[in-house]
Image: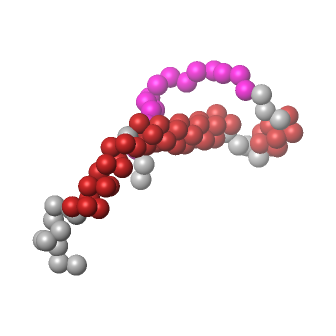
Amino acid sequence: MSTLHFDASAPKKATNLSINSDLLRQAKELNINLSQQVEGYLSELVRKAKEQKWRAENAEFIAAYNKRIEKEGVFSEGLRRF
């Protein structure tokens, strides 16, 4: 289950998009809610971009942490029974 990474209660804002006319026609014929679908897809794109940015910003720390764990193990190494 993922948590929202944006304010879902923020007001909607009209925008202009250029979409292939045949694709738009077919979507309308199929009663596809374009606003809802674009918002969902855009939300996922933003989530992935933020994740990539976080990973890039923290790559040095993550590498150092992994190196330390590889060398020293985890704090509970002698306590676990599996």
Quadrant of the image occupied by residue 80: bottom left
Q: Main secondary structure of the magenta part?
A: loop
Q: Is residue 77 above or below residue 48?
A: below
Range covered by the magenta-colored residues: 3-17
Residue 46 horizontal side relative to residue 14, left or right:
left
How far from the left and from the top, in percent, is residue 61?
33, 43
Q: Indicate whether residue 30 is drawn in magenta.
A: no
Residue occupying the point 77% across, 42% down: 27
Residue nearest the viewer, comparing 13 with 63: 63
In this orientation, which residue lies closer to the viewer: 12 or 46? Answer: 46
Q: Nearer the viewer, residue 76 or 67?
A: 67
In the rendered image, the residue lying farthest to the right is: 22
Residue at x 22%, y 63% (from the top left corner): 73
x and y percent of residue 45 in the render? 57, 40
Horizontal and vertical percent for residue 53? 47, 37
Q: x and y percent of residue 52 in the render? A: 49, 41
Residue occupying the point 29% across, 62% down: 70
Residue drawn at 17 percent across, 78 percent down: 81
Residue nearest the viewer, comparing 4 with 31: 4
**Left or right placement of residue 25 versus residue 59 in this view:** right
Residue 25 visible in image: no
**Most distant residue in the bottom direction:** 82
